[in-house]
Amino acid sequence: MSSSPIVGQTIVNTEVEAALCSHFTADAAVLFVGGWVANVTTIDSLVGKGDLILCDVLNHNSCVTGQRLSGAAILSFPHNDVATADRILRSVRHKYRRVLIVIEGVYSMDGDIPDLPAFVALKKAHKCFLFLDEAHSFGTMGPTGKGMCEHFNVPPSDVDIRMGTMSKAMGSVGGFILASHALVQYLKYCAGGFVYSVGLGPANAGATLQSLQLMAAEPERSTHLQHLSAFFFDACVSAKLDVGTNVRGTCVVVVYVGSTVETVLASMMLSDNHGINVKPIVHPAVEEGKCRLRFFISYLKTEAELQRTVDALASTLVEVKAAAREATAAAEAAAVVEVIPDEDEPQQAKDDVIAAAVVEAVSTL
């Protein structure tokens, strides 16, 4: 494989483009080798000096990287806060040639969603472009899994750019952009991640094509996934676990634990003692003290398996909190003995000694 503008695309890649447009109701599609590069290179190509990117403060790293590379001015608004985004635009819209609003469908670290109709109204009122990252919503949201537009009954044409990845619901590798014919044609000749990169491999494209055909033939897979996600969410709430701003029915369910040490320990104990594989999301990916366990619900799971997971999680967190309290007390006592009192010593250095002692104490549990 080589650069697609030079050597062209394989037949299966053009079939994937057509299938994406048909399934998700789009005018045109362009394929990339990954979801991360799709976001980075598309955002970088759409705006530049003299333009503004207005973005959700919790956008994914791929969006943030593309924003920084573009050279456009960047302003962020609090998570899912349409009112603040509107106030910003009322204040500064006149200063910029183009404005690109960047949001996500399902936020992967929080399991919540934006008010898409409100953002569509916002972009129309201020004559902006709307970019929607649907990495975690394509295949999982909406009555037939077609994403946030279907979930909110918003015409897909009202969202200027929709990004998707093949590595989530489609079980393959790659990324794609859905947009107008003109915009997609522009990306195919101006987006560095397409022009100067290899084309999507035929094996990945073939797997994606089969997934799209299966999604179209069996839309009940998406609705069953939403049912299982809602079941897991309800079970967590019943167990009095902290699910934060999670929206019931999204395939991403996060449970807040607290510190990095506690979250990593909970993940290890769930794996070692219960055979449950859930990865910790810790600082610097999220704020320290708000570390969490992130569950991706699968269509293949059963309600019994999900309930067992919640039961194991609840009991494990009780053990983790107790162990952390004991370790902290022991570490503080040790620090009193080991740290030579010095009023001139920075408090941060003392805190680092205590933190290191906590980690060492917990690791022996």
Image (spheres, helix red, strand yellow):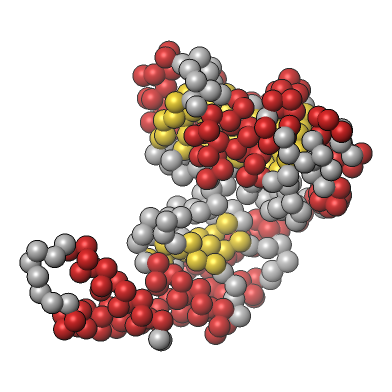
The quarter of the displayed image where residue 86 is located: top left
Q: In the rendered image of this protein, does residue 82 appear above or below residue 245?
A: above
Which residue corresponds to the image point at 63% horizontal and 34% vertical from the top-left? 41
- Label count reads 0
Q: Is residue 365 rendered to the left or right of residue 120?
A: left
Which residue corresponds to the image point at 36% horizontal and 80% vertical from the top-left? 360
The quadrant of the rendering that contains the C terminus is bottom left
Q: Tell me if I can see residue 185 in this picture.
A: yes
- For the view shown, which residue lies furthest in the right direction? 11
Q: In the rendered image of this protein, does residue 289 appear above or below residue 159?
A: below
Nearer to the camera, 122 or 290 = 290
Which residue corresponds to the image point at 69% horizontal and 53% vertical from the top-left? 168
Which residue corresponds to the image point at 46% horizontal and 75% vertical from the top-left? 266
Whole-percent x, y for residue 299 in the image: 71, 62
Nearer to the camera, 184 or 221 = 184
Whole-percent x, y for residue 21 in the image: 79, 34
Whole-percent x, y for residue 56 in the image: 46, 38
The quadrant of the rendering that contains the N terminus is top right
Whole-percent x, y for residue 98 in the image: 53, 18
Q: Is residue 200 rendered to the left or right of residue 95?
A: right
